[in-house]
Every structure is written in structure tokens, then in C-alpha cells.
Amino acid sequence: MLSSQLKLGLSYYSDLYDMIVPKDHILRKIRELVDFSFIYDELKNKYCLDNGRNAKNPILLFKYLLLKYLYNLSDNGVVERSRYDMSFKYFLELMPEEEVIHPSLLTKFRKQRLKDENILDLLINKSVELAINQGVLKSNTIIVDSTHTEARYHKTTQREMLKKASTSLKAALKDSDKDIYLPDEPEKRASLDEYNEYCHELLNTVQESPYSELPTIKEESSMLSEILDNQIDCYDQSIDPDARIGHKTVNSSFYGYKTHLAMTDERIITAATITSGEAFDGQELPVLVQKSKAAGATVNEVIADTAYSTLENLKDAQSNDYKLISKLNPSIIKGTRSEDGFIFNKDADTMQCPAGHLAIKYRIDKRSNQKKNTRIKYFFDINICHVCPYRNGCYKENAKTKTYSITIKSDYHKNQEAFQKTQYFKERFKTRYMIEAKNSELKNIHGYNRCDAAGLSNMQLQGAVSIFAVNLKRILKLKGEVCPNEKK
């Protein structure tokens, strides 16, 4: 059964809060600023309202999560600190002597109550509404960029996949025939080639076994065979199947997710989308603009880096009547062709295929026929294409090269090129740096550099509460109500 209210109980020790928690403490200010009843309204359908055991109020549990990301703590850490930190207890609306929850309840709350909720848009829209009501959001400009977050778990390598599949196959064989002879497993530091050789030998043993057609053994041997033939996607075998490899430069990469942000001049985040790491930044621009408007922000201009100056975005800016202050890059003038999955990676400054692999070189072809436009041809590593799980329909067997060409054309780009030469464009583009500072705040202060758990849904929850926290801090900062001892 769920209670509809969260109230501070009566206690002989309640006066301690007035003595210990300063009037300008950030948690006291947030409690005064935000009416958290919207959390109850959004989640009450996840509870039984008239029978059963009393449940912890979702407002209380959400406040625990907010403290967790506000102060970059673990589940155990935020519960332990709530046990002795009076400012935490005051914010949670607990009596000074009241017991705190068990940390496992936060895990249950995330998985059962916040699952499938549109929590990211809900919390951002609520914080933008607060900013507007408090009179601190007046800008008609948004700055757009993305920041990456490392996955909690590493990507499964082919060697790890082979070891896991071969171990499962050996166990299935032993269950059927305890006396069967099996080849010795390689040492822990064995190379991939040694593991390939061992797995082939193991499969030969299976074929010679009278139990090879048993369903369990047949299924396990088929899995191992497909891994050896590079037919199994390593991401599907990873602990975090939603994370992907993204590139920051040609020589540096990360495995995880991207958060695409829209932020006003006042440094209030008005919209966000969270994708896997290989996603192209530019394609998120129309969504961020629409979400910002839905949250209540006015969008007359968008400031962004070169990844956002695609043909599709230039068209969207014109059709939705906003200025796109984004410098053109000759390599992405045509933008992307959404039907084939190839994108331009602006961090690595080269083309990226649907599997996430980067082009190794490019060539500019100027056509002899004047009616034909100049094109840029990108070349990919053919050795990678040979074993790529996405090669069907992309790479032709026995082809000596794999190339991808884009054509430079469009009046939209000519207009944008003229616009970026204006003094107005140059001055406004200088403000783009502000979103880099916001990305740094999320990562270095609120733990957004690494995922808390596996899966896109968990990443979205982490992003939602983290962004809500930084927006609340920014609103208080703009109102001049932040405690001097708190991090800005």
C-alpha cells in the first residue's frame, strides 16, 4: 500500500535541523525550490494504492537517487551518509532518529518503478519549467554538443567469446559422457590463434562423439562454430549489449554511450538524448530542438560544431525558422545517407561505417565533366571487411577494395558558407565553449564519466537524475542562493 504524502514526523530532536543545517545550504534550497509531488503522480500507477504492505514513498526513494548523483556516491554510500549527515536527513524529510532504507531498495526502485518511464524528458522538462517560473531562463539560443560515458563493463573480445562457448560445450559433453576425452584448454595467456586451434579441435571431437546430435550439445557446438566463423556479434555476448565503440580521434576510442545535450546561454540543459557510442552527433539535432521547444524553451538559433552542419540539419533549420550557427566541413557537406548507415565522424575527421570502423584514407575526385560535382572517396581496411559481421550487403566477396563516396553540392551549403563569414556568426560561435564546461561538470563532479550499470535504460536513468541535479544547482546559482561552500 502506498501513502500519498511524505511528511517530516514529529520528534523531540527536530530542532536540531535548524541548529545544524545552514539556511543557505543547497539541500535546504532545493527542498524549498522543488515540489517533488510530481514524482508521486508519475509513479503511483506502479503501486497498489489500497492494500498490501506499506511501501516506501517514491518521493523518498527518488530523493535518495538525487543525493546519489548530486554528490557522486554509490547506493551504499548515499544510504550510509544519510545515516549520520543531518543535511541529508533533512532533505529526505526524515526525523533525526529515524532509520534509513536498505541500499538494495534503490536497486529495486530503479528496476521495478522507474523502468519504461520517460524519466529523461520528465526531469529535464520539470527543471526547465522551474527555471522559467523562477525567471532565470530568458535566452532564445541553445548550444548543442555530445559527451561520452564509458560503459561499466568492457566489450567482450573474440577470445573471451571462444572461451565461454567452449567451456559451455565441454560441460554439455561431460554431462552426456563422463569418460569422453577432450583436448586440453590453452593457458590463460594463450593467443587468439591458439584458442582458434583448440576450438576447432574441440568441434572435431564433438563430431566424432555419438552424442553430437543431442539438442544441448548441438546447440552449444553451433554457437562455437558461428563464433569461429565471425557470424556472432561480440556486442550481443557482452555484459552490456547496448554499449558500442565510439571514436574521439583517429587513434582513441571509448566503449559506452553518448549523451547529446542542448543548453541555453544561462547554462540550463533543455533537452537530451542518449545513444550508443557510435551514433552520429548530427542526426540528433532536430530531436534536441523539438524537445527544447516542448520543454518551454524558445529556440531562435542553435550553436554547434561542424558535425551538425549536415544537409538535413540545414534544411531543418530553414523549415523550422531558426539559425544554425555551425561551421561547414567540406567532408560532410553532403551529410549522411540514412539508408546505408555510413556517417562522418567529426572527432576522427573521417568516414565511419555501420559497424563503427573508420576509413583509413580518402581521395578528392574532381570530375572532368563540368556538369558533375566534385566527390570525396573514402577507403576502408579490406582486412576488417573480410570478417566484419555486417559485411552482407555492404562488402562484395573477393572485392579488392571497399570505398564510400559523397558528393559536394547543394545551395543550402552556399547560403551557410556566406552566413558563417558574417561578424554575427563569428561572435555567436565563440559562446560554444560553455557547453564543454557543462560536460566537464557532469563528468568530474557528478560521476557521469562512467555508467553505473549495464544497458541503455540504466544509462538514461543516470543521465536523467544527473542532468536534473545540475539544472537545480544552476537555477540556485542564477538566483544567487547557492551556499558558498558548495561546488558550483
Image (cartoon, helix red, strand yellow):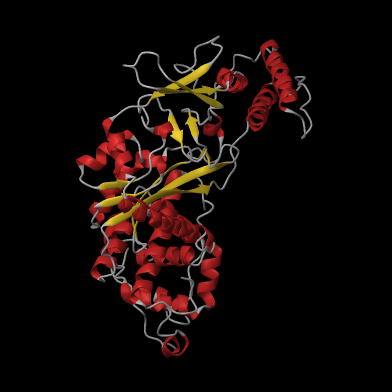
Residue at position x 28%, y 48% in the image: 289
Horizontally, is 419 left or right of 394 in the view? left
Horizontal and vertical percent position of residue 274: 41, 46
Q: Is residue 467 above or below residue 164?
A: below
Q: Is residue 476 above or below residue 405?
A: below
Horizontal and vertical percent position of residue 349: 50, 36
Q: Is residue 242 above or below residue 471?
A: above
Residue at position x 63%, y 29% in the image: 158
Residue at position x 38%, y 43% in the image: 327
Horizontally, is 223 left or right of 191 in the view? left
Q: Is residue 119 visible?
A: no
Horizontal and vertical percent position of residue 17: 43, 86
Residue at position x 53%, y 39% in the image: 247
Q: Is residue 107 visible?
A: yes
Quadrant that contains the N terminus: bottom left
Say which of 249 and 224 sits in front: 249
Horizontal and vertical percent position of residue 268: 35, 61
State the image quarter where residue 232 is shown: top right
